[in-house]
Amino acid sequence: MTSRPLLFVAALLAGASFSAIALGQGFNPDASIRIGSLYEPQNLDNTAGAGQGINEAFNGNVYEALFQLTDAGTVEPRLVESYEASEDGLTYTFKLKEGVTFHSGDPLTAADVKYSIERVTAEASKSSRKRSLSTIAGIETPDDQTVVITLSARSISLPYNLSYVWIVNDAAGDITSAEDGTGPYTLAEWRRGSALALSRFDGYWGEAPSNGEVIYTYFTDATALNNALLTNAIDIITSVQSPDSLAQFSGNPSYTVTEGASTTKELLAYNDRVAPFDNVKVRKALARATDKARLLNSIWGDYGTLIGSFVPPTDPWYVDLTGVDAYDVESAKALLAEAGYPDGFTFTLDTPDYDPHPIVAQFLQTEYAKIGVTVNINIITANEWYTKIYQERNFEATLQEHVNHRDIVFYGNPDFYWGYNNPDVVKLIADAEAAGSEAEQFEKLTEANKIIAEDAASNWLYLYPQIVVSAANVTGYPVNGLNSQFFAYDIEKAQ
Amino acid sequence: MALPFKPRYCCDTPRARTSAILAYTLRRTLILIVSLFVAAVVLFVLLRLLPGDPANALLGVGATPQQIEAARAQVGSDQPLHVQFGTFIGNLARLDLGTSFVSRASVLEEIGNRMSVTLPLTALGFLIAITLAVPLGMLSAIRADRWYGAAISVISQLGIAIPVFWVGILLVTLFAINLRWLPSGGFPLRGWSNFGEAAIGMVLPALTIGLVMGASLLRYVRAATLDVLGSDYLRTARALGAGFTEALVRHGLRNGAVPVISILGIELATTFLGAVVIERVFSLPGLGSMLLLAIQQRDYPNVQGVLFVSTLLVLIIGFAADLAQRLIDPRLRGRTRVEA
């Protein structure tokens, strides 16, 4: 008789565990997610020239910021519980979330936030975001949970700009080879040239990750990266860079191919300071002489997007401007003649030596020959590009890929390498930053966007596709990879 | 049976032999040091001749002039060349290869990490090459008149003609993608402490190196064996009653080994430096991929460090090959001239 209740309990337990499995634990909460990437970080500090790979591995995973740029492109509070701006827009008061601790166990305080922001704005910082935080005039910490930032000029993008500022423990010291962040993962292991492993941080303040560890494996060769996915050595490729390889994944039920929204723009940047590119008609003529659809198709097949200006569709001030200087060889010739170059001219195109620039340069050479313009292709290394073009502005025209989100502001800086200087645009971009509302900011930037397109400030060739390929049993990864981020905490791997 | 006479060479007594070898080792070491210094100077000059500032490795689009200056000061590229050179040589003398501009990691430590991949890879590839080339090369020479002798020779020609990365891709396609026997590449995160995985990961890349290196080695072994077969001393030994195999092993191997060792030394050095292609195909974190990345980033301390250490290794390989030849062949010991 005693065995009956036991049996009954056993049956109950069995039923309960069955339903737990049926009810949605379809994924393994301790799974190891293996991510393959071509972008190995050079060190672990995003203010010390580590490259885009560190954003991919660490943003939102190991380090968090006051705000987070989500994969959908919105800016949301992260370590901030609430915040308010003063009437004049010059003082921001941030209340920090309670109960947040660093991986070392120290609690998050206002002093850490002050330290972290000053790390980016410091003299020695190599952060590309330094300039956008230059309006910060002072940081006060009235108590452990409150940070007050005063600005020298209104800056509507402050929350957005703060989304790049990792909150680091002020006691951490050098973080080029170690970390102390607040994110859902800690750094477990790093082998240079090969891989970087993150493991779940059990003291995380927020929702626990859907997996136990994440391993980023780095490749220098795109074929080797694809082979790794084909042989089940990795689960996800963060960003496919070889269009030819897509055929082996698309249409195969074992893999999922996703095309997200990218912010990487391929452009022919003229030196707008020098003749003949100081002439808007010449710039428009070259834009009209470029069959961008054919170019994009020859490089990426059916992937990628045509753009009519520097602004990708994920920026809030996007408008479709592809019709402004649409492909039209006859009108290009007419414009060149009006500009005083009926027989064309010759220019040197400084071309970075890595893909896709050399192919794009050859394409342009053929295209422009049709309107009498001769292109001399000069192949240079990325390093030479930086010295010759970015620093010395010693060039006529160049090819470059610009990866950032919301970077139209470069056209508001007449001192930028391409030397575009339209006072209306400079004013619109400055006014947009000082705007009292997002609506006003968006309106001004949309206006600026239209003007740079009309001026053909540069020749925006196409927007790269952002393609993620994964094994079919893996879901929940970000598809847009804005600013190279790759949040791993929602990734689920089927049991 | 042994020869009834003993040929006489310069250093015939054991003592004379030892002192001749010692003297040679000393001279050869001196040359090694001088070569190393010359290599260091050439390295320094060549790297500085390239356009672009090394400080750019630290900067991105958006850098201000102050950031650029700060970066130049950090990497020392704002110093005059002779100051940079003095620092460079001084550090080398103390075996301090500096820290990387980009990763800020110790160059020597990083080279050590990478060596734990490149050295076993090269050694294993080399072993496979010798294991294939020596017996097959001898066989194809001895049995040159048979179909298989000719076949070995033809196949080895093919092996020489095929580029090494293509052999790698073929092996990956066959053994990793189609058969799923071996991984397509990569090295475990925790390195050799995960021995099984690391060793399995070495199989395909080492096989690739072994096959390609073995093919060219085979031709030299074959040529050396043919030389020996046609030599007077072999005929004499046989005339004195030695069997073919005995004559070949006793007298032929030693004589044939001398030219083959020269080639082995060169092949080993080439493979060591050429492993970069293999490392790329198989995503191995070896010395080659470190060099390639460092060159792209103009990371001078890393480039200098890798080139210096690999130059040192190549010189040591040459040294070892020369020494081995002198140990094998007494005729070479008496030579005063040193082939560097």
Image: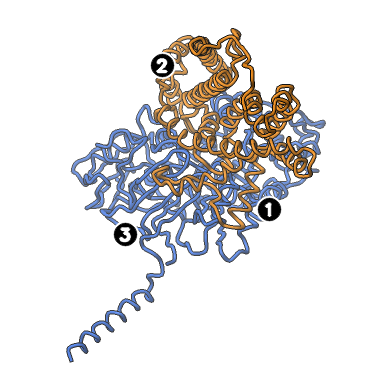
Chain colours: A blue, B orange
Q: Do the residues labelled 1 and 2 touch (CB within 8 Å)?
A: no
Mark 1–mark 2 distance (CA, rounded to whole Å): 52 Å
**Image quadrant assignment for residue A372:** top right
Residue most toward the top?
A: B336
Which residue is denoted by mark 1 in the rendering?
A301
Mark 3 lies on a secondary structure that is loop
**The N terminus of chain A appears in which quarter of the rendering?**
bottom left
**Image quadrant assignment for residue A264:** top right
Which residue is denoted by mark 3 in the rendering?
A207
Q: On residue B91, which mark appears? A: 2
Residue B189 visible, this orientation: yes
Q: Residues within 10 Å of mark 3 (few under 14, many from 20)?
A: few
Vertically, is B58 above or below A485? Answer: above
Q: Are marks 3 and 2 in contact (CB under 8 Å)?
A: no
**The C terminus of chain A appears in which quarter of the rendering?**
bottom left
The type of residue carrying mark 2 is Asn
Q: How many marks?
A: 3
Residue A131 visible, this orientation: no
Vertically, is A342 above or below A27? Answer: above
Mark 3–mark 2 distance (CA, rounded to whole Å): 50 Å
Residue B32 image point, x, y percent: 52, 14
Q: On residue A402, which mark appears? A: none
Do dots 3 and 1 share one subunit? yes
Mark 2 lies on a secondary structure that is helix
Task: Name the front one of labels 3 and 2.
Answer: 2
Pointer 2 indicates a residue of which chain? B
Say whether disc 3 or disc 1 marks the residue closer to the N-terminus: 3
Residue A449 image point, x, y percent: 56, 45
Pointer 1 indicates a residue of which chain? A
Task: Name the front one of labels 1 and 2.
Answer: 2
Identify which residue, A131 or B83, lies in the foreground: B83
